Image (spheres, rainbow, N blue to C red):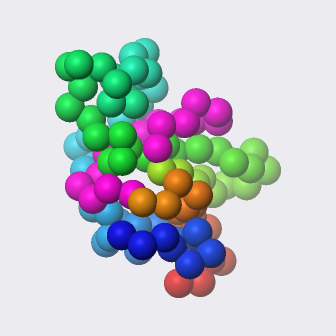
């Protein structure tokens, strides 16, 4: 998938494009190596892992960022499709226009 224009996409566009596996929404995990796909037992592809973050504590909206992040993380998603743009941001802010 080519990089996203302006590196921001809406939640609905992200769902259509990357197909998050809702049964695999992962909460905090102790084994960061497993999540990052660096463990021998890990079935995870690091390009299919996304981190839910609270980038702005003064906002009710959350962001989803590609990859395994530690800072401000709230949880993780695994998707069917791989991400290609590490600078992408998925926004659930309704003021963002698709």
Q: Residue at x 58, y 70 (%)?
A: 8
* Residue 83 visible, this angle: yes
Number of callouts in the render? 0
Q: Residue at x 46, y 67 (%)?
A: 11
Q: For residue 47: magenta?
A: no
Which segment is the magenta one? 67-83
Quick check: 25 left or right of 9? Answer: left
Residue 26, image quadrant: top left
Where the N terminus falls, by quadrant?
Answer: bottom left
Quick check: 7 left or right of 83? Answer: right
Query: Would you place residue 16 above or below residue 78 in this image?
Result: below
Q: Residue at x 43, y 15 (%)?
A: 30
Query: Would you place residue 2 above or below residue 52 in this image?
Result: below
Query: Would you place residue 28 above or below residue 68 in this image?
Result: above
Residue 73, image quadrant: top right
Q: Residue at x 73, y 55 (%)?
A: 59
Q: Most prominent secondary structure in the magenta stretch?
A: loop
**Residue 47: image location, x then y, percent:** 36, 47
Q: Nearer the viewer, residue 65 or 23?
A: 65
**Residue 81: image location, x then y, percent:** 27, 59
């Amino acid at each position: 998938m080519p990089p996203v224009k302006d590196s921001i996409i809406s939640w609905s566009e992200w769902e259509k494009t990357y197909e998050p596996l809702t049964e695999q929404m992962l909460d905090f995990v102790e084994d960061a190596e497993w999540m990052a796909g660096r463990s021998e037992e890990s079935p995870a592809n690091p390009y299919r892992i996304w981190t839910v973050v609270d980038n702005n504590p003064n906002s009710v909206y959350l962001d989803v960022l590609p990859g395994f992040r530690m800072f401000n993380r709230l949880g993780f998603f695994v998707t069917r499709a791989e991400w290609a743009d590490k600078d992408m941001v998925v926004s659930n802010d309704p003021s963002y226009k698709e």
